[in-house]
Amino acid sequence: MLAFRESIIFIICITCSLGSTDFCTKYGDKIECQEKSKFTRYILYDVNPPEGFNLRRDVYMRMSVFARKMQQNFGDWHLVLPPWGQLYHWQSIDVGLQELLPWSLFFNVSSLQQFAPVMEMHQFLQEIGTSSLDLVYILQHYADAFESGKWEEKFEVEPCHEDNKYTHVNVGNYRGPFWGYTNITAKQVECLSFHGHASQLQEVIKDLDARTIMFDHAEIALHDTFGDALYWKARRSMRFASVLVKLASNFRSEYLNSTDKADGTVRPDDWTQETPREGVLGGPYLCAHMRRKDFLWGRPKQIPSLESAAHQIKDHLEKLKLSTIFIATDAPNSEFQELEQHLSQYQVLRYKPSKIVKQTYKDGGVAIIDQIICSHARYFLGTYESTFSFRIQEEREIMGFDSETTFNRLCGDKEKKCNKPSMWRIVF
Ligand SMILES: Nc1nc2c(ncn2[C@@H]2O[C@H](COP(=O)(O)OP(=O)(O)OP(=O)(O)O)[C@@H](O)[C@H]2O)c(=O)[nH]1
Ligand SMILES: *[C@@H]1O[C@H](CO)[C@@H](O)[C@H](O)[C@H]1NC(C)=O
Ligand SMILES: *[C@@H]1O[C@H](CO)[C@@H](O)[C@H](O)[C@H]1NC(C)=O
Ligand SMILES: *[C@@H]1O[C@H](CO)[C@@H](O)[C@H](O)[C@H]1NC(C)=O
Ligand SMILES: [Mg+2]
């Protein structure tokens, strides 16, 4: 069956049915045509390489809203989930290769599918039976994007403003990064200057004949709407894989005296059944997300010293009458131990994965377990402008925590005006 499928050639057939362009498939001598609108077509995407996991989740939301609209308006379009790999922060060397990881390792793909027509890359490759993509658009900003004051949605194919990683091997054959797959190529690669919302991509592709279209630098397309009910639906559909939730639950009940029942955080398995909630209690611990590493030099004014962080945490614990603190951090163990020393009269915990958990779920999965534990805390203290913290705040909004317990952060040692994070409240 596979060999047969691989011999399929896609051609555009204008003669099959008068007046409309259809998709035809050639099986040996036989040609079968279908109306374009009934044919399955695929959108793929990738993101600027240095971007981290949590910004990539945000780009996914934009693309899933776009794909959902394509399917509603223009036929059987699917979004292919870009495999995870080679992220700057995934630095553990004892967990095997951290690339070509499917979304199912981290997320519940059936939950995603209840919002948008998505599929994993391996499923796509199997379905399409070829690894040559029809068309790649590398999104780029207009050269003068930030000059003219007026907002105008527009796009056009232009010469590439910057070098890119796609190389023309021969006619109709480009090589490129393609998420780390060395066997994927493209027939055509273009730079597309783009200014506007992700749904403007509908205009870009709705009349094309290409069947597999990839957008690189998808982060250039903006959210259609930020913070409305559709945005939150997309966000709510991003349920974590249930094994990761389970691992976090085990840690909560074993070390933090925290269970969904006691904490008031029981929620429907199916996110579409969720309803607005408020005043949720959470487990009897405070969580601080302490982003360190590159933030120490990237945002030196807003990142506290370990001593100051300990002081701030102490103040909150006293006010909340809590004695347990969970620390989520990318800091090396030496920094964690120093923090612990400053907080010796309290119980200070950090999640340490077993060897097998780390091998299986890797740096990405361990970070998610940290996020889940933090999202269930009675009180959350985040890090200034960290998307890792933002995702925790969203999770708490979904569960129904009071926003006073969620939109808080650690302040820099000498920060004069330590503003609270913006409150992005959930909308149903
Ligand atoms: N396990 C664990 N990993 C973390 C923690 N904080 C950061 N990391 C790792 O470092 C990465 C942080 O990168 P991003 O996801 O881009 O978030 P960010 O760097 O805080 O935010 P940006 O400024 O928008 O990039 C995470 O994806 C994790 O891999 C943490 O508390 N626990
Ligand atoms: C392409 O490479 C991937 C990853 O190495 C592999 O799983 C897949 O089977 C390959 N596909 C083809 C058609 O060779
Ligand atoms: C995904 O969520 C559903 C409930 O909506 C659940 O039944 C299923 O086990 C979950 N699957 C995974 C892989 O987490
Ligand atoms: C755990 O929490 C429950 C309330 O949910 C409380 O009654 C109990 O005393 C707590 N146990 C410990 C050891 O703190
Ligand atoms: Mg980052």
Image (cartoon, grey):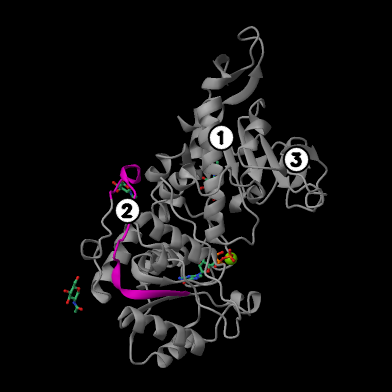
Q: Secondary structure at mark 1?
A: strand
Q: Residue at x 52, y 47 (%)?
A: 61
- Please give left or right for residue 398 compared with residue 129 in the image: left
Q: Secondary structure at mark 2?
A: loop
Real-space Cα distance between discs 3 and 1? 17 Å
- 256 in the magenta segment: no
- Indicate the amino acid at tag 3: Glu
Ligand 4's quadrant is bottom left
Disc on the earlier residue, 2 or 3 = 3
Tell me whether the residue at label 2 lies in contact with that at label 3, contact meaning CB atoms closer than 8 angstroms: no
Q: Is mark 1 within 8 Å of ligand 2?
A: no
Neighbours of disc 2 within 10 Å: few (<14), some (14-19), many (20+):
some
- Indicate the amino acid at tag 2: Arg
Q: Which residue is denoted by mark 3 in the rendering?
A: 190
The segment highlighted magenta reads: 268-289
Q: Which residue is denoted by mark 2 in the rendering?
A: 277
- Indicate the amino acid at tag 1: Tyr
